[in-house]
Image (tube, helix red, strand yellow):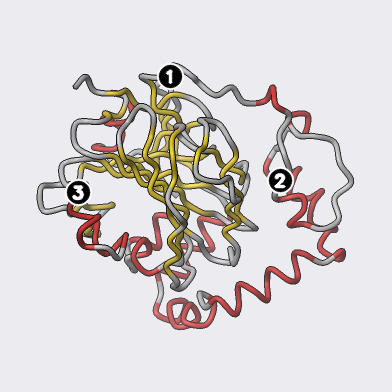
């Protein structure tokens, strides 16, 4: 549970059954003991096999109703499994990608918080201190992001779980960092440094408009699969980069000093500990003049 703002400035408290369950799991010693088993990749793979099976179709209708999902936004299809439904494709008209070169766009639907990276290349998410090096597992690369921003896009189960490139440019090979699979719900961050323990994968994007930036996908509880496409070296803004299998997940952008600044409402909300709800393709920041 936590405070969520929309782009009109309305702030509400988001509380769900998932939030209550995770608060119980992470908030008590017995639950944390169980987590040692639940967060392993093997458990996630087992859950993934179940949700890939035809039997899992029985969960789809109830999920749509309980989360109020507007299925008119999605391409009509007969789903083979729950995961087939979970990675459903939107109709092209359902999301508009802002193409103005000075605007940095959201790579996904989700809840956004931004954090300044200090000159020692460290930053805080909630009450947990991170370093860019612990996130990237690369000391030299991490140091180059000192003074920039970390953009954390948290996806919930009801969100669209396909994501795009935040800008066009040339991309590096994907870097895979193995780990466990905690939930990315804020309650977990109070107990575990999830963004340096969880499985994640990233590329370096030499972007057309914002210099060199990192785009990273972070797996989460019961998300055993980060499915990135092989798009080649040259990509365009708005191209699909990949998708997540079932569960809440996170996408992280890192931008360098002097390249981009978050929109004022997002920056202020983040300073107040409020996440901002954003949609795939909408503007979330601006290019700084050089």
Percent of width and height locating residue 18: 56, 56
- Cα separation, mark 3 vs mark 1, equals 34 Å
Q: Residues within 10 Å of mark 1 (few under 14, many from 20)?
A: few
* Residue 277 location (% of width, % of height): 47, 33
Q: Nearer the viewer, mark 3 or mark 2?
A: 3
In the image, which disc is placed on residue 66?
A: 2
Residue for badge 1:
8
Helix, strand or loop at label 1? It is loop
At a point 40% along the width and 48% down the height, the residue shown is 252
The percent position of residue 109, horizontal first and vertical second, equals: 54, 37
Towards the viewer: 196 or 272 = 196
Of circles 1 and 2, the one toward us is 1
Q: Label 3: how many residues lie within 10 Å, few (<14), some (14-19) or many (20+)?
A: some
For the residues labelled 3 and 2, the Cα–Cα distance comes to 44 Å
In-image side of 37 versus 175 (left or right)? right
Q: Position of residue 146 (x, y in %)?
A: 16, 47
Give the answer, above or below, for where 45 lies relative to 70: below
Which comes sooner in the sequence, label 1 or label 2?
1
Kindly give the residue lying farthest to the right in the view shown: 78
Question: What is the number of the mark on residue 144?
Answer: 3
The residue shown at (44%, 16%) is 100
* Residue extending furthest toward the front: 233
Q: Name the one closer to the observer, 214 or 161.
A: 214
136, above or below 96, in the image: below
x 48%, y 42%: residue: 14
Please determine whether, in this image, residue 217 is positioned above or below residue 11.
Answer: below
161 left or right of 219 in image: right
**Residue plotted at (24% across, 56% down):** 132
Q: Secondary structure at mark 2?
A: helix
Precedes in sequence: disc 3 or disc 2: 2
- Mark 1 vs mark 2, CA separation in Å: 25 Å
């Amino acid at each position: 549970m936590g405070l969520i703002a929309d782009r009109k400035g309305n702030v509400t408290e988001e509380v769900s059954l998932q939030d209550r369950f995770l608060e119980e799991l992470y908030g008590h010693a017995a639950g944390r003991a169980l987590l040692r088993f639940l967060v392993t990749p093997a458990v996630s793979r087992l859950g993934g096999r179940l949700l890939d099976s035809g039997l899992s179709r029985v969960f789809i209708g109830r999920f749509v109703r309980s989360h109020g999902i507007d299925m008119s936004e999605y391409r009509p299809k007969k789903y083979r499994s729950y995961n087939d439904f979970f990675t459903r494709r939107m109709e092209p008209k359902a999301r508009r990608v802002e193409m103005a070169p000075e605007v940095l766009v959201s790579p996904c639907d989700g809840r956004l918080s931004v954090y300044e990276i200090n000159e020692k290349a460290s930053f805080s998410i909630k009450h947990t201190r991170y370093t860019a090096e612990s996130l990237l597992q690369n000391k030299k690369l991490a140091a180059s992001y000192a003074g920039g921003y970390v953009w954390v896009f948290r996806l919930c189960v009801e969100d669209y779980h396909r994501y795009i490139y935040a800008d066009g440019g040339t991309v590096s090979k994907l870097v895979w960092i193995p780990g466990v699979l905690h939930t990315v719900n804020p309650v977990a961050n109070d107990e575990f440094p999830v963004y340096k323990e969880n499985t994640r994968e990233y590329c370096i994007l030499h972007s057309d408009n914002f210099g060199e930036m990192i785009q990273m996908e972070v797996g989460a509880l019961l998300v055993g699969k980060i499915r990135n496409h092989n798009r080649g070296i040259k990509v365009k803004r708005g191209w699909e980069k990949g998708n997540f299998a079932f569960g809440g997940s996170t996408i992280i952008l890192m931008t360098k000093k002097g390249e981009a600044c978050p929109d004022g409402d997002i920056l202020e909300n983040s300073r107040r500990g409020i996440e901002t709800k954003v949609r795939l393709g909408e503007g979330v920041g601006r290019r700084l003049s050089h």
